[in-house]
Image: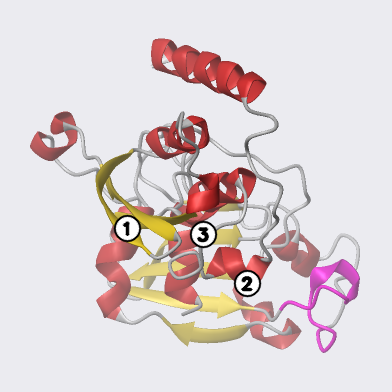
């Protein structure tokens, strides 16, 4: 793994030094990035951003305009470094008027297909889901209609800190709905995907953000009515707090799993 990473670092350094003037200067809007399956990119940097942030499904595509397809192939080599690091391999291409659709498929190593699937963090039969509306203009990043947490309060510890610390620590649940959280039940049709997301995993690259988390999404896993585990998630900062898990939770959310969970909970 260290050998692969060193090769990747070397290739990226060489390629970037060769092609500063060849990489395109256009900048896509967030709307274009979100619609990457239908909108061709306008710069190599935007293509890299799409791969890093948006490539999460088994099959993905990248729409490259002819203007960025240089004859030497430098631009696609730069993007290819990120694509390979995310575990994708080329699966074909389709030429269009003015651009090319490059197709990619996630590569599953043989060792993963023959080995047993990781055991999920929790044994459960129901999930309570608590969510609080976000408003970026409100103080503390929470809804304007929500009472601001008092310093040192349980609510502050839930929203920003390390409450709960164990599955037996359930006193905070009583206060959630009183302080602006909305409770619902997660449909059982989503359990298989949640089992994949909430399980130990190996990752190619880890991502860490320096921002302070605001845990607006809380999942309470239950078995026969009893709490089996609790997970708090901040999608903005890509951070989590999980208690009661069976297995190592350090790599939770990596390889695009934060994005998959967010789409599952906020369709």
SS for dot 1: strand
Q: Is residue 194 left or right of residue 211?
A: left
Task: Report x, y in % for residue 56.
Answer: 40, 55
The residue that appears at 71% across and 47% down in the rendered structure is 25
What residue is disc 1 on?
Answer: 95
User: Horizontal placement of 155 versus 62: left or right?
Assistant: right
The label shown at residue 231 is 3
**Quarter of the image holding residue 209?**
top right
Res. 215 visible in picture: yes
Q: Are marks 3 and 1 in contact (CB under 8 Å)?
A: no
Contact between labelled residues 2 and 1, with CB atoms less than 8 Å apart: no
Residue found 42% across the figure and 33% down from its top: 85
3 on left or right of 18: left
CA–CA distance in space, label 3 to label 2: 30 Å
The magenta stretch is 134-146
Residue 79: horizontal and vertical position, in percent?
A: 49, 38
Determine the image quadrant of residue 45: top right
Label 3, label 1: how far apart the Cα atoms are: 45 Å
Residue drawn at the location 69% of the way across and 54% of the way down: 26
Q: On screen, 185 above or below 5?
A: below
Can you tell which mark lies on residue 31?
2
Q: Residue at x 26, y 78 (%)?
A: 189
The answer to whether residue 139 is magenta is yes
Res 122 visible: no
Q: Earlier in the sequence, mark 3 or mark 2?
A: 2
């Amino acid at each position: 793994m260290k050998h692969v990473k060193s090769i990747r670092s070397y290739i990226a350094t060489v390629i970037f030094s060769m092609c500063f003037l060849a990489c395109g200067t256009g900048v896509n809007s967030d709307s274009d990035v979100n619609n990457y399956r239908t909108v061709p990119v306008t710069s190599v940097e935007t293509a890299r951003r799409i791969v890093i942030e948006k490539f999460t499904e088994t099959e993905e595509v990248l729409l490259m305009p002819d203007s960025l397809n240089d004859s030497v192939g430098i631009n696609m080599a730069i993007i290819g470094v990120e694509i390979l690091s995310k575990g994708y391999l080329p699966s074909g291409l389709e030429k269009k008027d003015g651009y090319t659709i490059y197709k990619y498929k996630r590569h599953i190593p043989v060792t993963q297909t023959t080995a047993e699937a990781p055991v999920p963090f929790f044994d459960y039969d129901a999930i309570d889901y608590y969510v609080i509306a976000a408003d970026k203009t409100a103080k503390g990043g929470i809804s304007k209609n929500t009472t601001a947490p008092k310093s040192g309060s349980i609510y502050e510890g839930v929203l920003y800190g390390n409450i709960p610390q164990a599955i037996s620590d359930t006193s905070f649940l009583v206060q959630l709905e009183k302080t602006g959280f909305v409770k619902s039940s997660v449909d059982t049709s989503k359990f298989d995907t949640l089992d994949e997301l909430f399980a130990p995993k190996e990752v190619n690259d880890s991502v860490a953000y320096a921002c302070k988390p605001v845990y607006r999404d809380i999942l309470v896993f239950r078995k026969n009515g009893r709490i089996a585990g609790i997970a708090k998630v901040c999608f903005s900062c890509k951070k989590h707090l999980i208690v009661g898990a069976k297995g190592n939770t350090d790599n939770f959310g990596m390889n695009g799993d934060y994005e998959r969970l967010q789409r599952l909970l906020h369709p």
